[in-house]
Amino acid sequence: MEIFENIPELLSQFVILLLFSLLIGLEQRKLHNEKINKFSIFGTDRTFTFIGILGFILYISEPDHFTLFISGALILGILFAVYYSKKIEIYKSFGFTNIIVGIITYSLGPIIITQPKWFSILVVVSILILVELKSFFQKFTSMLNNNEFISLAKFLIIAGIILPIIPHESVIPYINISPYKLWITVVAVSTISYFSYLLQKFVFRKSGILISGILGGLYSSTATTVVLSRKSREQKDSENKSNFGTAIILATSMMYLRIFVLMLIFNNELGLSVLPHFIALILFSLIISAAFYFLKKNNTVAQEPTIEEDNPLELKIAFLFSFLFILFGLITNFTIMYFGENGLDVLSFVVGFTDIDPFLLNLFQGKFDIGLHVISKATFQAIISNNILKILYSVFLADKETAWTVITGLGLITLLNAVILFFV
């Protein structure tokens, strides 16, 4: 260890600079070997190593005003400009990446000397990764349509602009929740929805019916049930019809997971108290789905249709959710105030035939004068009626095979839900 301690710091910095510059140059050598026009890149391993050494020497030679370093940068910039103009003239190539990497390599010396070592490593690693991912970025952008960046902008508006400026202290009358808590609820639900959409759009692009059920359930199991039920009736290939019912059951299992995650986020104590019940329901739903899949699996390999899902992230949906959140908060507060727990029982069953997320999130974080067991009971009651709604959708919208699968599968799951209700 004493040997390393006696090494001059300037020497260790130069060795690091030498290795980093050479590593970047070797990456450029790889690109050089892959190009048809070999001379469209101005240099590779030795060139980039010398550029890094030049920047290092000029920086330490006159550290007070950096006149030499700046002069070297200007001369290097002129050489790059001449090279780039000839590159366009001869090869009709407008790529600028090689020059930018060269300029960064020239700046490695000051970075290694003045900044922490982890930052120098981060710069080099970032260069290597970004240069190597060129083909990936080209393939990725080909998958994007005109609305993807607009959707991302909407999400950034919801999470990064509106959320920080909303007041924390003031409380919305009669529901005892601040506007900040209201909007952070919108952000949480929007994040789950957007995440499921991105998975289906870019990761499981040609995933078929079952993955569509799983990812759709993370957003809305009711909406997924409607879409899959209609698709099952439109599907002419009988070999694939059995999977629609299985996908709907999978969507419901993801509904249990989504509700439980939201419960842990907004009411950790409540989530831990019902943890065994949700684990049982999620596992039972998955077992039912697996049973139907393997029982009705056809040995003939058939191409499953891909279910295209529209982007669920819309500002109008976010504002609609916030409106429903406030509305259900007012209704819930009024019900508990004038009708007590019995009124909440009736309300939870009724709400299950609408959108249950705003109602449940109100219960999870609302300061109502009720115990955790009452909130747990209302949650499971709302889910039961929501499952009944999905069964009705499948009966009226799906083909007979899918309808019977959903009736049997969701019927068993709802029965277990009802049994658990007695132990809450």
Image: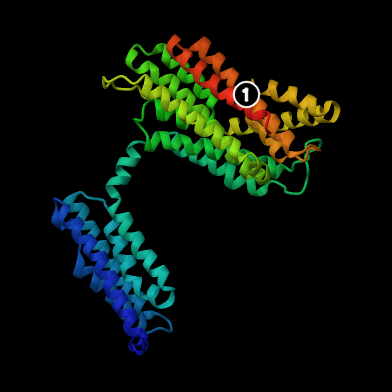
Q: Nearer the viewer, residue 354 or 412?
A: 412
The residue pinned by badge 1 equals: 384
Nearest the viewer among 152 and 321 is 321
Residue 298 % position (x, y): 31, 19
Q: Residue furthest right?
A: 338
Q: Measured from the top left, where is residue 420 in percent x and y?
A: 63, 30
Q: Would you place residue 282 above or below residue 28 in this image?
A: above
Left or right, residue 104 beside residue 375: left
Residue located 61% across and 34% down the image: 318
The amino acid marked with disc number 1 is Ile
Residue at 55%, 24% in the rendered image: 413
In the figure, residue 325 lies in which quadrant? top right
Please provide percent x and percent y for residue 96: 29, 55
**Judging from the image, what secondary structure is the residue with disc 1 in?**
helix
Q: Is residue 67 left or right of residue 262?
A: left
The quarter of the rendered structure image containing the N terminus is bottom left
Residue 96 seen:
no
Quarter holding the C terminus is: top right
